[in-house]
Every structure is written in structure tokens, then in C-alpha cells.
Amino acid sequence: MRECLGKWSAGVLAVLVIFGSATETVQAGSLRTVAQWQQQAEKLQGNKQLSTYDEAIRQYPAYVDFYIKRGRIYLQRGESQLARLDFDKAILLDDQNAAAYTGRAEERACAGDSKGSWQAYEKAVAIDGRNPLIFQSRAHFFYEGLADYRKAFADYDKAAQLVTAEDDPRRLKIALQKLGTQLKYAAVQKGYYAAIVNSVDIILGMKKQKISTRQLEYLYTSRCLANYELEPCG
């Protein structure tokens, strides 16, 4: 279970949960608005962030987003049952909340319930079919949970189509996630390396994106590997 959750936290959950530096402590019982609780929680991490959402929920027990955020923290910590309770509570409060269904889908995927995960993703897409984060998350489920790489590629492409601004950093993130999936697919489908070279070239051509030195190293290494497989040295 923890291995599965670790994969989610390294991939999709890192996109969906915002962490900051732990600079504040929770003042139990202090009165704050919803926005103030959100602002404080986003500055914290670990147990302090979790405690902040605990107190926020005590003050605002009907505010759906607090349950979703806390559920994602539990999921990253490997506490799947507590995560499930929070996502279920969020859906009970608002059965048209796409983020709550996405959280349920991720929790069900980690629990090995592929059918339950698929159903939750279908509901999330039906509610908010123009949210790229849902398609990114489902793409991860397709290749990690079902080893269905083609469907994963289709979801990454859909996510990219929904992010239209050329300078939106989500475009680069989606492209890198798809490339990682392509590299895994090429390991079992050798003829796929040409597509990897093409993907790397497309990413390098994203002039309005800020590509870090580490990302450039990853891209050049990936292209070098792909070219070697296409034309191995004698």
C-alpha cells in the first residue's frame, strides 16, 4: 500500500497539493474565516498542516474543500482509510464536486480497487470535463494501475489541449509526465523510441516555458537513450 501511495505522492499528488514552509503553529479555537484558514494551511507542511485542517474543519464542518485537502494529506501519509473517510464526507456534502471524486479515484486506485477508481474518474470528468488535473490524474491511473499506456497518452494529450496559454507552466508539467510514461512504454515496446525523440523535441521547442537545468539534463538523456535504441552502435 505505501509503495502505491509513494508513487502517487511523487507524481499526481505533488501537482494537486500545495506545500510551503512550516512558519506558523495552529492556535486551537482561534476564530478565522475560511480564506484565513486556507492561507495558513498553505504555508505549512506535515503534522502542522494536518492540525490546521483539523481545526478548520471543527470551525467549518460543512466546508467541502477542507475535507478534500486533508484527505490528500492522509493519502500522502499512507493513511488510506482516513483519506477515504474525508473524500466520502466531501462527496456527501457536495455530490457535484469533481475534486472530491478525483480524490476518491486516487484512493481507490491505491487500494487496488480499479473498478471503483474508474467509476470515480468517470464521475469527475462528467462534472468537470475541462479540468486538466483530472485527466493528468487519470492518465497516471491508466499506466500505473492498468498498464494501459495508450489511454494514458490520450489523457495527457487531452490535459495539454485544455491548457491553452503557451506560458502556463502546466503545459511543461504535462509534457514531462507524458514523456516519463512514454519511456516506460518504450521499455516493452522497442519500436516506440522514435515517438520519444519527437516528444523531447516538442518540449525543447516550448520557448515560453522555463525549463530548469535538471529538466534539460533529463530531456537530453532521454533523447540520447532513444537515439541509441534506434541506431545502436556496432
Image: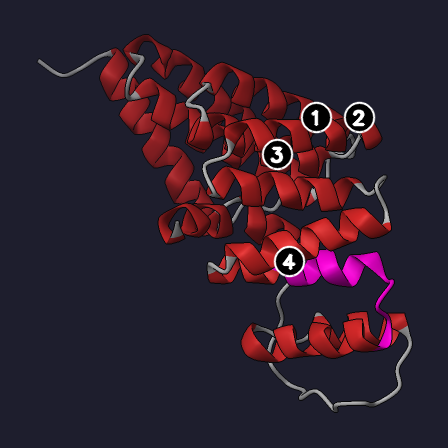
In the picture, residue 29 is in which quadrant?
bottom right
Residue on which the image places disc 1: 122
Q: Earlier in the sequence, mark 3 or mark 1?
A: 1
Q: Quick one: label 4 or label 3, which is nearer the N terminus?
A: 4
Q: What residue is at 87 percent from the left and 63 percent from the top? A: 62
Q: Residue at x 64, y 85 (%)?
A: 23
Mark drawn on residue 126: 2
Residue 113, compared with residue 16, is above or below; it is above
Within 10 angstroms of label 2, few (less than 14), some, or many (20 or more) residues? few
Mark 2 and mark 3 in contact? Answer it, CB < 8 Å: no
- Name the residue that disc number 3 marks: 136
Q: Earlier in the sequence, mark 2 or mark 3?
A: 2
| Residue 203 seen in the figure | no
| Residue that carries the numbered disc 4 in the rendered image | 71
Principal secondary structure, stretch drawn in magenta: helix
Question: Of tags 4 and 3, which is closer to the observer?
Answer: 4
- Label 3 CA crowd tier, 10 Å (few <14, some 14–19, many 20+): many
Q: The residue under label 4 is which amino acid type? A: Gly
